[in-house]
Amino acid sequence: MRKVWALGMCLVMGMQVGLWADEPYKLQIPPGLPPLKVPQDNPLTAKKVELGRQLYFDPRLSRDNTISCASCHDPTKGWSNGERFATGVRGQVGGRSAPTIINAAYNRFQFWDGRAGSLEEQALGPIQNPIEMDMTLEEVVAKLNKIEGYRRQFREVFGTDVTADGIAKAIAAFERTILSGGAPYDRYKAGDKNALSPAAVRGMKLFFGKANCAACHSGPNFTDNGFHNLGVGWNNKDPDLGRYLVTKQEGDKGAFKTPTLREIARTAPYMHDGSHKTLEDVVRFYNKGGNPNPYLDEEIFPLDLTDQEIQDLVTFLKEGLSSPNYPMVKPPQLPK
Amino acid sequence: MRRCTRILLSWACLLALTTSLQAQDQKKEKSASEQQKKPAAAKPAEKPAADSKVKTRDLVINLYNPCGVAVQPDTGHVYISGSGYQRILRFTPPKENQMPTIAEVINGFPKDVYGKGPKYEIGPLGLVFVSKNLLAVGGGGNPDGKEVLWFFDVSQIKDQPIDTKAAKHVAGPIPKSEKTNRGEGNFYALAYDGKAIYITTNGDDTKGWIARCPINNGTPGKLELFIATKPQVETTDAPVGITLSPDGKLVVGQAGEINVPEDSLLCFYNIQTGKLELKLETPLYDIVALAYHPKSKTLYALDFAWMAPDKGGLFRLDVTTGQQPSLKVTKVLSLDKPTAMAFAPDGTLYITLIGTAKEGDKYKPGKLIEVTGLE
């Protein structure tokens, strides 16, 4: 009798924590990146990551079945969209560019203004945004529950039918696997002095010195996870106030999250409003000290870089931070 | 009877201090003349848990952005950076049959504004005594690259405050160079080991410098860059809190970004080589001060918590070293924007707070508080 009771308890516990014969996902952390912190209530498992991959690429999460996560965060376009702004259902265009999700697993905040504190929290945002996927959570849950392939997988992974919480966790789990490291910069740092060209080495020294890039683009993921005002878009009639819209702190006006620079060569156009088409444009913008405004970050000031130094810096960004093991993922077959 | 005496003393203390400060502020602010002359109803610092032995008491109120504190050896006088009014104040704690006093002793420091909103007017910042009477004052009012470290012989201060021109020595500045893009400024906090002063600075955020000023026979040498903290920890810059461990390490609180929560680091550097020996992540927002209890050798930290002041306060940090170093963080007190602290030899802790101004307040919200009962 006691054994039966114990077995029953194991089954109940298994249902609660979603351990339905699902194996842990073997995540390979690329060289140069630190160990990844995974939320205790959303461990990476093989089936969950696969489910997340399907949800990520599935346009049925949008009202008119045209927009998936991958529409704006496309692996073939640096996990961004190659456009100035994100485009949603019915051709609606948002006001900010689509940030890459590469290494978003390391981000302290998600979205340009940091309004989400985790990938799980972020994942449901675009689904409910009327400009992006334009669904309510009730609608998307009901819609996916009509797809037997999803219902079966949700039961296997979470022990439930499709839920909003499960959607968020599965997409977040998949996004945690999109990592880029092992770039020439990492190899150079590890001791391979031939990993970077002479121009890239010069650019690297500028990056960590005169060009002041590392004041904000610091650490293994090249971001301080903070928010800074560069003056981008400040000349517009109604400038985007960025982080201020979340915190209401005066000093956060016009401040946006520092993005990673890994795979930066693939994620043009740049800045939160996609206003700079090339990395040369970006560096020249910084070189003039950004765009003056009352909230300009103290780390933004004229750099006095020469044309040669600008070219060297761009070479480092393109050559040094592009991994030969770029995280390319092909769209899966979607469940029916 | 004894309790009654203590309450009277405390009330008398506040009355004397408030009246004194009002008089000083009239020099600085026209609006001060509009202030009522009766003492402010000083709000107590947040009380620790009822069963705690830790007690707090407001010693000086009506301070404007106090950002530094140091206890003079022998006398026990407490010096405060009245940063918002660009001056140094001296608080004389009460003794038997002696009323406490507060006096402006040094003024004329340059002024700057820190932050973009909230904004803080600042002047002198970190304080430390390098001998019985020689007080080092870290500047905060000059632009980066022009900031200096002042030294004042406080025994020369009589009835009237002295001006910065009366400084006995001035060290610095640290101008723009290949090592520092902007030159260094905002000398937040100072620590002295008998040979040199170590200064946390704000300037080049790609490096996050700690500067060093050797002291030879009471005379400062050249103020120079010493430890680039950021390249060693990779992620977090902004060294602010600094102290010396009982075994001679330089202990540094690296505050990180003011708009990022829980990103402060506690770092231990070799004082000879400047090399990082231990880095511990903390759940604190912005460590601005560190100090060891003089008797128990327990480490304490102040968290300013810029983006969430309700999270700020005094914390006990229990560090375990060895194969797997660890850190236990315990909140001792909630405090409203604490900035600096210094222990007296008997274990009494003095803390400066900026506080939060409320509409209609007659007084500035800054304070000097006393904390006793710490272990």
Image: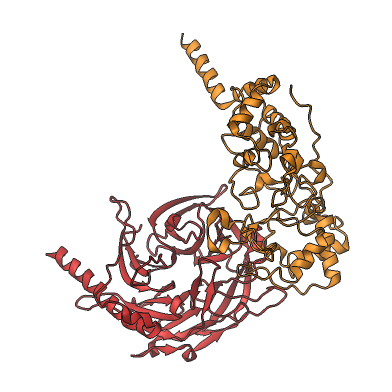
Chain colours: A orange, B red
Q: Quadrant of residue B274?
A: bottom right
Location of residue A152 in the rendering, given as x and y in whole percent from the top left corner: 66, 20
List x then y, in percent, for residue A147.
69, 22
Question: Which quarter of the picture shows residue B101?
Answer: bottom left
Instruction: Say which quadrant the C terminus of chain B sits in.
Output: bottom left
Question: Does any portion of residue A197 appear in the rendered image?
Answer: yes
Q: Residue furthest top?
A: A1
Tell me: A306 left or right of B270.
right
Q: Nearer the viewer, residue B313 or A293?
A: A293
Q: Is residue B313 left or right of residue A199?
A: left
Name the residue at 66% across, 47% down: A106
Question: Which image quarter holds the N terminus of chain B?
Answer: bottom left
Numbered disc total: 0
Q: Residue at x 70, y 54 (%)?
A: A259
- Is residue A204 something that shows in the picture? no
> Residue B336 in the image: x percent, y percent?
41, 61
Residue drawn at 81 percent across, 60 percent down? A279
Front in this rendered view, residue A308 or B220: A308
Q: Position of residue A170 (x, y in %)?
A: 65, 32
Task: Give the vertical position of A13 relative to B215 (above or below).
Answer: above
Q: Nearer the viewer, residue A95 or A46?
A: A95
